[in-house]
């Protein structure tokens, strides 16, 4: 692979630490967590102690004040481990930035230090049972009553939903205003009327807990409003390029990990008197995958460069999310084929990677939505 030029010595030291963290604190427990459909709560505290959570949050709010390349490293090193990098990223680089950009200082000081330490786990309540990728079709409402809002509705497919202690919830504060009536509220899970459904039984990424959230006349203080009332949809649109690039980063990391596993396996596995990698078909397949992963990595690195300059636009981020997640699925499917029957056994990491990959083309906006966004730029 081409040498990457984005990262400095501090980044690589952080990567080394994350590699050890993944090897020692996550990898040995993946099968157990798959069965319980969530990782242990203690992992969040350990991640907080090591500065893995909320690395871009300024030090005054408990973070490290790092650039987003540190966030990219978390995704690259931990996403291949059951998709758990995405659990941390959702918490640190999706929920936390909304608070950093738009919350008042008191709200930042209330939540961000706890998020950085792992004391609090954040979730994002956007998707609804009847809405999917259509964020404008929200039915959850938050009606102002004096110094608080009354929140009613439900959310589904919420990552970190079962383990979260707070959720950033998108709701209609003006039901007649369409997208201009959407606002964002921070909701504590111990508020009366906040309920969690059972852990959803996903096909893949089983170690990452996913649940439904329910709101029944939840009384949310008015100061928990993020930014301005009616500006929630705008805030979401502003954050989506970075959120979608995160999915592309994880996709390339998983594809690269699968390729490395497959090269090692086919080099050792014998068939018809020679190693599987000795067959021309195997070498050509692996050469094709390596080339496409390299192309994807170069594009993602360019998008990261644009992100650091605050120049990543929605269409380019959509290209990265759709193309890299499609590639991830292709790579994992080809790699499972080269593993043969063992590739279909759930105890093999390649099989887990295959089932984990499929969701990438759905969440964060389906790839069909990505193509629609790209088409608008034509």
Image: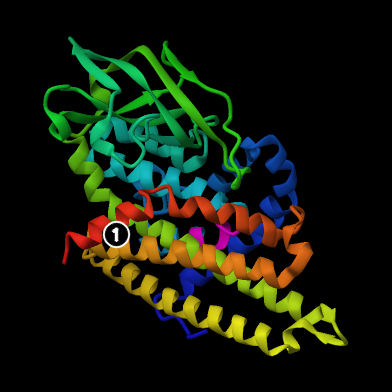
Which quarter of the image is occupied by the C terminus? Answer: bottom left
The residue that label 1 is drawn on is 371
Q: Is 350 situated above or below 302? A: above
Pick the residue in front: 323 or 316: 323
Q: Residues within 10 Å of mark 1 (few under 14, many from 20)?
A: some
Report the front residue among 107 and 167: 167
Task: Provide residue 237's location: percent of width, then percent of height.
Answer: 23, 47
Q: Position of residue 355 (x, y in %)?
A: 61, 53
Relative horizontal placement of residue 276, taking residue 235 as reference (left or right) = right
> Residue shown at 29%/56% (left/top)?
241
Which residue is at the far right?
Answer: 273
Q: Position of residue 103 (x, y in %)?
A: 25, 35
Relative vertical location of residue 113 with respect to residue 296 in this rendering, above or below: above
Q: Residue at x 84, y 81 (%)?
A: 271
Q: Quadrant of residue 220?
A: top left
Q: Is residue 132 magenta?
A: no
Residue 284 as seen in the image, left or right of residue 150? right
In the structure shown, which secondary structural element does the residue marked by tag 1 occupy? helix
* Residue 1: % across, % down: 52, 84
Q: Is residue 228 visible?
A: no
Residue stretch in magenta: 75-80
Q: Is residue 232 visible?
A: yes
Front-lying residue, 178 or 246 = 178
Q: Please tell me how many numbered marks the rendered image carries.
A: 1
Taking 24 as reference, is 178 above or below it?
above
């Amino acid at each position: 692979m081409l040498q990457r030029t984005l990262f400095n010595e501090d980044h690589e030291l952080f990567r080394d630490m994350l590699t050890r963290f993944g090897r020692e604190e996550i990898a040995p427990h993946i099968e157990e967590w798959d069965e319980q459909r969530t990782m242990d709560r203690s992992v969040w505290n350990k991640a907080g102690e090591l500065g893995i959570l909320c690395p871009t949050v300024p030090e005054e709010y408990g973070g490290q004040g790092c650039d987003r390349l540190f966030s990219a490293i978390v995704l690259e090193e931990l996403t291949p481990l059951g998709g758990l990098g995405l659990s941390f990223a959702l918490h640190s680089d999706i929920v936390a930035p909304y608070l950093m950009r738009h919350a008042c200082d008191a709200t930042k000081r209330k939540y961000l230090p706890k998020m950085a330490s792992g004391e609090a786990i954040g979730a994002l309540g956007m998707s609804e049972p009847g809405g999917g990728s259509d964020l404008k079709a929200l039915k959850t409402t938050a009606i102002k009553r004096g110094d608080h809002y009354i929140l009613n509705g439900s959310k589904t497919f919420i990552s970190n939903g079962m383990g979260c202690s707070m959720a950033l919830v998108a709701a209609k504060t003006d039901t007649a205003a369409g997208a201009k009536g959407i606002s964002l509220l921070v909701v504590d899970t111990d508020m009366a009327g906040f309920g969690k459904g059972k852990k959803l039984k996903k096909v893949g990424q089983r170690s990452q807990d996913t649940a439904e959230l329910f709101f029944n006349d939840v009384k949310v203080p008015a100061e928990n409003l993020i930014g301005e009332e009616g500006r929630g949809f705008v805030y979401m649109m502003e954050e989506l390029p970075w959120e979608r690039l995160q999915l592309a980063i994880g996709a390339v990391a998983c594809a690269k990990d699968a390729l490395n596993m497959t090269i090692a396996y086919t080099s050792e596995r014998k068939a018809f008197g020679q190693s599987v990698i000795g067959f021309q078909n195997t070498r050509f397949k692996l050469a094709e995958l390596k080339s496409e992963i390299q192309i994807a990595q170069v594009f993602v690195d360019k998008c990261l460069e644009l992100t650091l300059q605050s120049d990543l636009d929605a269409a380019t981020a959509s290209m990265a999310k759709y193309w890299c997640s499609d590639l991830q699925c292709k790579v994992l499917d080809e790699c499972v084929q080269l593993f043969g029957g063992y590739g279909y056994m759930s105890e093999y990491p390649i099989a887990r990677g295959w089932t984990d990959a499929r969701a990438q083309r759905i969440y964060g906006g389906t790839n069909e939505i990505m193509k629609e966004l790209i088409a608008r730029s034509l």
